[in-house]
Image: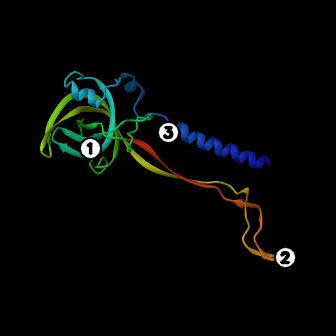
């Protein structure tokens, strides 16, 4: 009975650690304090009004383009959750460009990646998008984090639990099914997203 209680305590501690470990933002604390709650929509409606403002935006990468003076990441903006992770199931907030002064490998930060960007609003940049001219809000990157999916696999311990016995021969009675205490092997698999910093 004592061993069973220790197993339950160990499992509860493991799950709690996993949950609390995911609650933090990948953006550094000083930059989070400096950031302001300016949305893509607000910036689009008031071009130039937020120039120099530090924001934390995120979304799904459309493409990464390296130029002679740095890199431009075209992002489909998405709402951020409590971890500053983009919500892949939410409706888009619009598009923006995250600019870096250095090279960013498009194989590392390629189409479909979820990213969180912290940086300063430069203004807007108008470019053709299909048959229209689209005004992209532009952010100079101070921190860039790519979210990667990691699969966890937890093997538990054998624990008693009620269940069906397999059919078989029971002495004095013949074949049949029985109900009683059996053993099971708890096994959990779950996916979790972790932020990876890109210099």
Tell me, yes or no, whether the two marked residues, 3 and 2, touch with CB atoms within 8 Å: no
- Sooner in the amino-acid sequence: mark 3 or mark 2: 3
Q: How far apart are the two marked residues, 2 and 1, measured between alpha carbons?
A: 73 Å
> How many other residues sit within 10 Å of disc 1, few (<14), some (14-19) or many (≥20)?
many
Tell me, yes or no, whether the two marked residues, 2 and 1, touch with CB atoms within 8 Å: no
Q: How far apart are the two marked residues, 3 and 1, measured between alpha carbons?
A: 26 Å
Q: Nearer the viewer, residue 74 or 119?
A: 74
Q: How far apart are the two marked residues, 3 and 2, measured between alpha carbons?
A: 55 Å
- Sooner in the amino-acid sequence: mark 2 or mark 1: 1
Q: Position of residue 55 (x, y in %)?
A: 32, 28
- Residue positioned 24% across, 27% down in the render: 43
| Secondary element at image label 2 | loop
Reading the image, the residue beneath label 3 is 22
Q: Quadrant of residue 36?
A: top left
Left or right: 69 with respect to 119?
Answer: left
Reading the image, the residue beneath label 2 is 173
Q: Is residue 199 visible?
A: no
The colour scheme applied to this rendered structure is rainbow
Left or right: 144 with respect to 135?
Answer: right
Reading the image, the residue beneath label 1 is 104
Taking 136 as reference, is 111 above or below it? below
């Amino acid at each position: 009975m004592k061993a069973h209680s220790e197993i339950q305590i160990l499992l509860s501690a493991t799950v709690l650690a996993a949950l609390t470990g995911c609650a933090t933002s990948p953006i550094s604390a000083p930059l989070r304090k400096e950031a302001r709650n300016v949305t893509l929509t607000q910036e689009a409606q008031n071009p130039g009004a937020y120039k120099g403002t530090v924001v934390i935006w995120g979304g799904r990468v459309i493409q990464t383009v390296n130029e002679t003076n740095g890199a431009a990441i075209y992002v489909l903006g998405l709402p951020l959750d409590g971890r500053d992770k983009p919500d892949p199931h939410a409706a888009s907030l619009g598009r923006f460009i995250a600019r870096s002064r250095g090279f960013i490998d498009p194989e590392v930060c390629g189409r479909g990646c979820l990213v969180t960007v912290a940086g300063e609003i430069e203004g807007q940049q108008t470019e053709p998008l299909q048959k229209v001219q689209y005004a992209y809000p532009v952010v100079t990157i101070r921190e860039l984090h790519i979210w990667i999916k990691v699969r966890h696999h937890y093997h538990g311990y054998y624990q008693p639990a009620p269940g069906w016995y397999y059919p078989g021969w029971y002495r004095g009675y013949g074949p049949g099914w029985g109900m009683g205490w059996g053993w099971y092997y708890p096994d959990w698999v779950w996916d979790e997203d972790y932020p990876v910093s890109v210099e």
